[in-house]
Amino acid sequence: MVAPVPAPGPAGSRESDGVEPLLRVEDLSVTFRSGAGPVTAVRGISYDVRPGEVLGIVGESGSGKSVSSLAVMGLLPGTATITGSATFQGRQLLGLGDKQISRIRGSRLAMVFQDPLSALTPVYTVGDQIAETIRVHQGLRRDAARERAIELLDLVGIPNPRQRSKSFPHEFSGGMRQRVMIAMAIANDPALIIADEPTTALDVTIQAQILEVLQTAREVTGAAIIMITHDLGVIAGFADRMMVMYAGRVVESGVVETVYQQPRMPYTMGLLGSIPRLDAGERQALTPIEGVPPSMVSLPVGCPFAPRCPMRIDSCEQTEPALLGVVSDDAGHLAACHRSEEIARDGLTNTDVFVATTVPEAPPAARLPREQRPVVLEVRDLVKEYPLTTGGLLRRKAGSLQAVAGVSFDIREGETLGLVGESGCGKTTTIMEILELAKPTSGTIAVLGKDTAAMSGKERFAIRRDLQVVFQDPMASLDPRLPVSDILAEPMITHGVPAAERDRRIRDLLRLVGLRPEHADRYPAKFSGGQRQRIGIARALALEPKVLVLDEPVSALDVSIQAGVINLLDRLKAELGLSYLFVAHDLSVVRHIADRVAVMYLGRIVEIGTADQVFENPTHPYTQALLSAIPLPDPVKERSRRRILLTGDLPSAANPPSGCRFRTRCSTFAHQLDDDRRRRCLDESPELTGAETTGEDHEVACHYPAPAAVI
Amino acid sequence: MGKFLLHRVGYLVLLAMVATVVAYLLAATQLHPRSRYEGRNPAPAEAVVDQRLTELNMNDKTPLVERFGTWAKGVAHGDLGKTVDGESVNTEMSRRMWVSLRLMLIGSILGTLLGVVAGAYGAIKQRKWSDQTLTVISFVLLSVPTVVLAVLVKNAGIWFNQVSGNESTPLLFTTGEITPGMDTWSWAGIGDRVGHLVLPTIVLAIGVNGFAFYSRYQRNSMLDVLGSDFLRTAQAKGLRRWSALTRHGLRTALIPMATFFSYQFALLFVGATFTEKIFGWHGMGEYFVDSITKNDTNSTAGVTLFVAVLVLIAGLLSDVVYAALDPRVRAS
């Protein structure tokens, strides 16, 4: 349609293999005005996307990965100054008027956003929203566009598409909404789809489904995809080429396999080394990257990564390295590092460059066999019911919802139990019940041997010293109006610790979690996310508890920050002899930190056992599906894996399936059982039993268990 | 939804009954119709006054409960009693509510539309000079009491008539609804009505119940929506900026306004006290003020009851409008 204009590429920075790029971005910079001065979020990046390929862009928050794509789409606010060039199918995109860019957006160039709830207009039906993009570009009549929208919904795997097209976004689950977004993106057969963190807000099993849908979309339209994500596992499985961004620049790019196996830039090496891996044993040493990404307001000269880089030399602080070709198996491999030659020559890996923290020795108590250690937290047949009511003034009970339906586990001194499951499985309700220290709907909770139902108010107050909690969101869980010293003093004041001792303890605590004691009078806003989570941990430790409940403590943190906090938790456990109840949806983190793991599904524990048993010999079909859904940050392994895809969404806890709660999504039930054997799944709820598992400490709730290695 | 509304209507009837009792007791205990006769010279005989007040069901020598019983019985039959002058409150109100409606309908619609458009525009142009101008204008108007605004507009009208040389045959009228003796259903009559309507309509449209108020709220709710991801999605789909802003943005930003719209339109019949007084329209607002100054128990109670019922209806209306605008509340 439009004659492609050959654009000269910057010399040496790109291979020319004869294929005309679909999108060529050259020297793109984006600057925002801010109160503190101009913020250059993207600083001169260049890349090509070839027809049909998947380019992965990785980076932490603030690295400029999303901003650069929004700039290409022309979706940045007017306050942004964009320079450089972005040629799409031979046409310059930057500087196009609203009318011209609107013709390209949504037709040749489509986008899938991160949060599918807020990205869909709440007041129109999904069918109408898909039909709108078809009508805008193809000028179809309303009913013809609607029909096409229904076909698209069917294509992205929405059951009963005709009926569901009349639903509003809030009536869909997160995964379904993301399918709608994809349907919208492929509606006009685009040549390029930009997917901005398309699976970040979703559970792993749903993420696996969505990646599958994107793959389908790619096959149907033949479109190229730019996949923006912070998840190195997603890139490993999905992308052909990748680029790593840091502080608004591309610091490394190349074919996915090469970048993972032969990283030539310390930041990439650090990233790869700082993620806990599902396929590594429990005691994998993580190599955290010290420090935090630089503020983009006034970047110092030199390499922006230099302050965090263990390999920095003087020239790193004087000149910023250019993105140049490096020696590796991939001819197009580029890296921006003064020392990439040395890295290539000496074959340095992340453990050579970064200091791997040695895994701390377990305290003597924790080295005893499990049976000989005292139980610190015991939960038996815990049930939490919420009444469902109808009517306004005169509330009537219409039924009940069992968020937790009979959960039993115990934690012994010095051990970590990882409680995992998708959102809505009841893991948060479980820990809230434990923290409440009240009599549950039914069942018992015993903390340090004391039954919470039989506790007096005084005892309950006393026992809170021993049971503390760290919350997920370090921003929301610290009072922004209190300086850190007050935040840490609060639990001690409540429990009557004398003032003199408090001050000493605050300093000790800050040192303990790796912060500087002189920062005690600063406010939380002065700290980065990782530091705030450390403050949250220090607060939980203020009263020297025996048990810590950790509710998704690292899921709000960037990858390079996460490793530091995980290492801290590891160290604290060893030094202080703590026991953890670690709740997380990220199984890789749990794999790294937990001694034992309990997998929850719809209010029940379906599998429990030592981490090694559960991860290496998963026996419940749900555990197997969950583990197989997690992408591994290793392109070779990731691409050769067979994935067990779960169908559909989590059923409602208000109306759980009869018999085995998992049967509606169980692949064993669907494909391997005959009707006689299915009967049992339909009628009888399986109990946790260790009878059919190989390990000693390993129980599973399934009528037809079959261990399978899925990693 | 139907069942939900039925429930709501049930509550409303209950609340309306409470409002009725409170309205009457308040009027009957706070107003003293007898004082109307006491100041006269020569003072009428007490027996005559008693008889007259008893006829009107306003005699303070009758126990309050008994008076209320009589009044309530009337209300139950749709009769709000007699005014202090012996007229029917029903007749008075049924005439005056339409006067109020005629006065307010255009002004309210205009004010709401102006406010919504200006608010949405101001939000889109946030911090630009056009937004700041609109903000200044609306805050000035918000801080001017209606009494002052009405008098200013009235004077401006008189000045306009003077400079346009129409002092004897003015284009803009400042008093009343129509020139007495004019035939309503002639072209001249309609023109005359329009001439009477212009000035009070301006007051209503730009004042605290119109543009000034709505533009602030609409601007806020539009600003909330402007940062939304779905607006970005709409543009990513290929919608032009303005159609994304109106079809997806403004449409969603109207939802929080539903409550204001409903109250505005249910209360059209209640009238605008100051505007009516100053422009000499004999509507409900004027009636309410007059009946208090005249110690007219039944009229005061009647108007209060009427307003209470309209407020309750407005509440119901806002639920319906809310559900119509927002599919998310329909389900629950």
Image: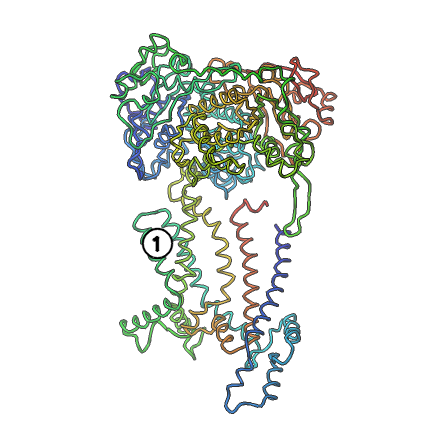
Q: With A509 as the anchor, is B312 left or right in this view?
A: right
**Quarter of the C terminus of chain A within the rendering:** top right
Say which of B2 and B193 sits in front.
B2
- Residue type of the residue flagged with mark 1: Thr
> Which of the 4 image quarters holds residue A424?
top right
Quadrant of the image for the N terminus of chain A? top left
The residue labelled by disc 1 is B135
Residue A519 in the image: state x and y as whole percent: 38, 32
Q: Position of residue B71 (x, y in %)?
A: 63, 74
Going 32% across and 21% down the picture, which residue do you hit? A306
Residue A596 horizontal side relative to residue B199, left or right:
right
Residue at left offset 25%, top offset 21%: A319
Q: How many labels does the image show?
A: 1
Query: Which color scheme is applied?
Result: rainbow
Residue A403 at what x, y percent from top left? 63, 34
Q: In this view of the protein, which residue sits in the foreground, A213 or A608?
A: A608
Viewer can see residue A18: yes
Q: Which secondary structure lies at badge 1?
A: helix
A96 relative to B96, above or below: above
Q: Which of A581 and A89 is in front in this view?
A: A581
Q: Where is residue A652 in the image (x, y as percent from the top left)?
A: 63, 34
Q: Is residue B293 left or right of residue A604?
A: left
Furthest residue toward bottom: B42
Q: Can residue A195 be seen in this view?
A: no
| Mark 1 burial class by Cα count in 10 Å: few <14, some 14-19, many 20+ | many
Relative to A79, is B151 above or below?
below
Q: In the rendered structure, the residue with mark 1 lies on which chain?
A: B
Q: In which quarter of the image is residue A452?
A: top right
